[in-house]
Image: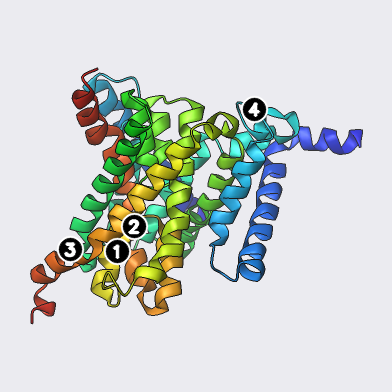
Amino acid sequence: MELARNIIDKNGLIFAFLLVGLMMLLSYGLSRYVFRGKIPGVAIAILGALCLAFLGGEKGLGDYPVFAGLAFLGGSMFRDFAVVATAMGADMAQIKKAGKAGAISLFVGVLVSFTAGVAAALALGYTDAVDLATIGAGACTYIVGPVTGSALGATSEVLAISIAAGVVKTILVTIVTPLIAGRIGLNNPHSAMVFGGLGGTTSGVVAGLAATDPKLVPYGALTATFYTGLGCLLCPSVFFLILRALMGS
Amino acid sequence: MKIYGVALLCACFLTGKYLGRLLGQWIGLDGDIGGVGFAMLLLMLASAYLRKKQWLARESEAGIWFWSSMYIPIIVAMAATLNVKAAFEGGWVALLAGGAATFAGLLLVPLLAKIGKDADPDNKP
């Protein structure tokens, strides 16, 4: 036992990769066999991880020395690095293909989500511009939230709320999309691209479209891939500055 | 070689972070403003340019794709190391913020799809 502990302590990051791999396996298994694909594996994995973090304190599971590697893997360096790499999924030629509709929906989508998130936070008593911007960014996606929050120096508590908001959105988009697709005219590639830009959460958009009509998936994913990048660009800069000016601080 | 792709990713990442800090400094904030976004734009521009010049081999791209596919596991690791206990008191904020954003977005789909269609010559009636 002592020996195993020693190996884990010395190879924390490797142990973290193993842990996350097992968590993903379990989550995707649950998604497929228990929830029959109704809830995406990603959402289950993230919710599960948030539940596990509940067992720890300020750094979640990372508070336990055994899981120190997990805190490093989930730290800002690896996170930002991997998020930047996702830009490969979307090149300039595709921006043109997505066209005007997709581009407009992307900007409107980020703005609307941010505004809705800020409004919700304001309604529940948050007044600090950094907190508001972080929660508003979290309402865009669970990546924009923490990227914005750590850039602005938000507390871990607010970061967690912003991620939770993003996770709520991912799950809601997944569940609600097939239910209201007919009513919002989501039955052709054109509206699917607009939907991807407005929804933004890639996993939610893809899972929601797959449940609606698998043929629409690539069109929604096409615009959704740009959403997080645009959100990471706009939320901590333009939107935050406007918000701070409006809050008068 | 895969490392070429990873190195390109690193170059874009660090340059983007630098631009983000620079913008932060310029605006007067001690922080990184849109660094990740700049890095993503740089990576898109650089990879598009290199592909056009045929300097980006499939094998090099695979190095970037690997890290691209790691973002969800990394986000899971991050979620497991957050101060969730403290966030639990703000649970309603998360629910309300996420819910409001979702429904506002979904309700705008028919409206924006119409605007887009007018702008798209292929879809004109």
Q: Do marks 2 and 1 both belong to one polypeptide chain?
A: yes
Residue type at mark 3 is Leu
Report the front residue among A202 and A53.
A53
| Amino acid identity at mark 4 | Gly
- Do the residues at discs 1 and 3 belong to one chain? no
Residue B51 is situated, as x and y percent measured from the top left of the image, at 32, 62
Q: Which residue is mark 3?
A: B111
Residue A14 position, x and y percent, is 70, 43
Q: Residue at x 25, y 70 (%)?
A: A191
Q: CA distance from mark 4 to mark 2?
A: 32 Å
**A194 or A169, which lies in front?**
A169
Q: Quick one: B77 or A84, which is closer to the camera?
A: B77
Are the residues at dot 2 and dot 1 in contact (C-beta closer than 8 Å)? yes
Question: Which badge, 4 or 2, comes first in the chain's sequence?
Answer: 4
The residue under label 4 is A57
Q: Residue at x 67, y 60 (%)?
A: A25
> Which labelled disc corresponds to residue A195?
1
Q: In the picture, which quadrant includes the N terminus of chain A?
A: top right
Q: Secondary structure at mark 2?
A: helix
The 10 Å Cα crowd at callout 3, few under 14, some 14 to 19, many 20 or more, is some
The kind of secondary structure element at disc 4 is: loop
Which residue occupies the foreground of this view, A29 or B37?
A: A29
* Residue highlighted by disc 2: A199
Q: Chain of mark 3?
A: B
* Cα distance in 3D space between marks 3 and 2: 14 Å
- Callouts 1 and 4 close, C-beta under 8 Å: no
Question: How far apart are labels 2 and 1 at the CA level?
Answer: 6 Å
* Front: mark 3 or 2: 3
Do pointers 3 and 4 mark residues of a single chain?
no
- Residue A244 percent across, percent down from the top left: 24, 25
